[in-house]
Amino acid sequence: ALARDVAGSAEKFADRMNRRARSLGMSSSSFRNPHGLTEEGQYSTARDIARLARSAYRIPVIRASMTIPEYNFVHNDGKVTQITNTNKLLKQLPYVTGMKTGTTRKSGKCLVSSGSLHGHTVIAVVLASTSKAVWTDSEALLRWALESPQVIKPTSTPNPIN
């Protein structure tokens, strides 16, 4: 509904997403729908997803909302639906600040996570993982980046993950 209201259709919204992605330097991504579920011709890389996450993280309302463990959504009719944050790392590491989980059959378990410690903020991206490894790998990346910080330049990704 949001895509239709903003751009007129899901396809036009995806076109806008692709233009925005290019403006963020996301050169190895192509979006075909607004929801991110598997669709022919849709792909991205960990590097591009990290660029997108960094852009989203800079928006205060998004940054604040991704740290909320639970939220009670009140419908127009007064019905309340509790929405639970599915990022387990929020409860496991004190410096985790959130981000986004995602799963499809084709892409497996995916997690974009962020954390801040001693004035440093990092974003970790794990794609095409398993139920257990997505959490352990993400935690290991955050621990490595925040507890032993060093500046590194990411390499290019020759093979995007669909």
Image (cartoon, rainbow, N blue to C red):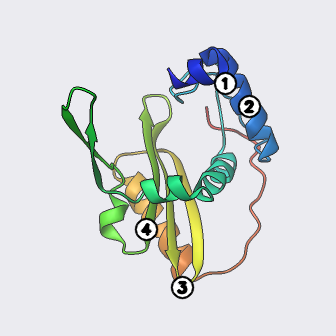
Note whether 17 is above or below 115 in the view shown.
above
| Residue drawn at the location 71% of the way across and 36% of the way down | 29
- Kind of element beneath mark 3: loop
Q: Which kind of residue does numbered mark 2 sit on?
A: Asn
Q: Quadrant of the C terminus?
A: top right
| Residue drawn at the location 51% of the way across and 82% of the way down | 147
User: To which residue does mark 1 refer?
Assistant: 14
Using the image as rendered, state which of residue 120 and residue 60 is in the foreground.
60
- Kind of element beneath mark 1: helix
Q: Which kind of residue does numbered mark 1 sit on?
A: Ala
Tell which circle, 3 or 2, labels the residue nearer the N-terminal end.
Answer: 2
Disc 4 crowd, CA 10 A, few/some/many (<14, 14-19, 20+): many
User: To which residue does mark 4 refer?
Assistant: 96
Disc 2 crowd, CA 10 A, few/some/many (<14, 14-19, 20+): some
- Kind of element beneath mark 4: strand
Tell which circle, 3 or 4, labels the residue nearer the N-terminal end.
Answer: 4
x then y, percent, for residue 20: 75, 38
| Residue drawn at the location 58% of the way across and 68% of the way down | 122
Q: CA distance from mark 3 to mark 1?
A: 38 Å
Tell which circle, 2 or 4, labels the residue nearer the N-terminal end.
Answer: 2
Mark 3 and mark 1 residues within 8 Å of each other at the beta carbon:
no
Q: CA distance from mark 3 to mark 4?
A: 12 Å
User: To which residue does mark 3 refer?
Assistant: 118
| Residue drawn at the location 61% of the way across and 81% of the way down | 149
Note whether 84 is above or below 140 in the view shown.
above
* Disc assigned to residue 18: 2
Residue occupying the far left of the picture? 79
